[in-house]
Amino acid sequence: MGVGFIAELSNLYTLNFKDSKLIPKNYKGYIAIANELKIITPIKGYFMPRQSVTRGEAAKMLVNYLKVEKQ
């Protein structure tokens, strides 16, 4: 999406996930952007950064990304 330089400014972002302390600092900007664009979907307020992503979840993220790109 070309927002990497913005996402890398991780101090700009506040994540409201219940497990946000588990998210590595260098990923926070990317996750914040993906969350705001509705590319990712938190589960009951959790991001679960240590859990593997299923194929179905990955497919859903790709579809959500393509919807954002289309706008």
Image (spheres, helix red, strand yellow):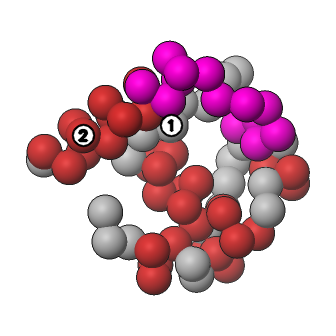
Q: Amino acid at mark 1?
A: Ile
> Looking at the figure, which quarter contains the N terminus?
bottom left
> Does residue 3 sit above or below 27 in this rendering?
below
Q: What residue do we see at 51% from left, 72% from top?
A: 7
Which label number is shown at residue 66? 2
Q: Main secondary structure of the magenta part?
A: loop
Which secondary structure, mark 2? helix
Q: Amino acid at mark 2?
A: Leu
Residue stretch rendered in magenta on the structure: 47-59
Give the class, few, some or many, for how many residues have Cα within 10 Å of label 2's Cα (few <14, many ≥20): few
4 with respect to 17 (left or right): left
Pointer 1 or 2: first along the chain: 1
Q: Position of residue 24 (x, y in %)?
A: 79, 62
Residue 66: image quadrant is: top left
Residue 29: image quadrant is: bottom right
Q: What residue do we see at 22% from left, 37% from top?
A: 67
Return the residue found at the far front.
55
Return the residue found at the far right.
21
Give the class, few, some or many, for how many residues have Cα within 10 Å of label 1's Cα (few <14, many ≥20): many
Q: CA distance from mark 1 to mark 2?
A: 12 Å
Regarding residue 62, the answer to whether it shows in the image is: yes
Residue 11: image quadrant is: bottom right
Residue that badge 1 annotates: 40
Q: Is residue 20 magenta?
A: no
Regarding residue 18, the answer to whether it shows in the image is: no
* Of the pair 66 and 21, the residue shown nearer to us: 66
Q: Position of residue 60 (x, y in %)?
A: 41, 25
Q: Is residue 51 magenta?
A: yes
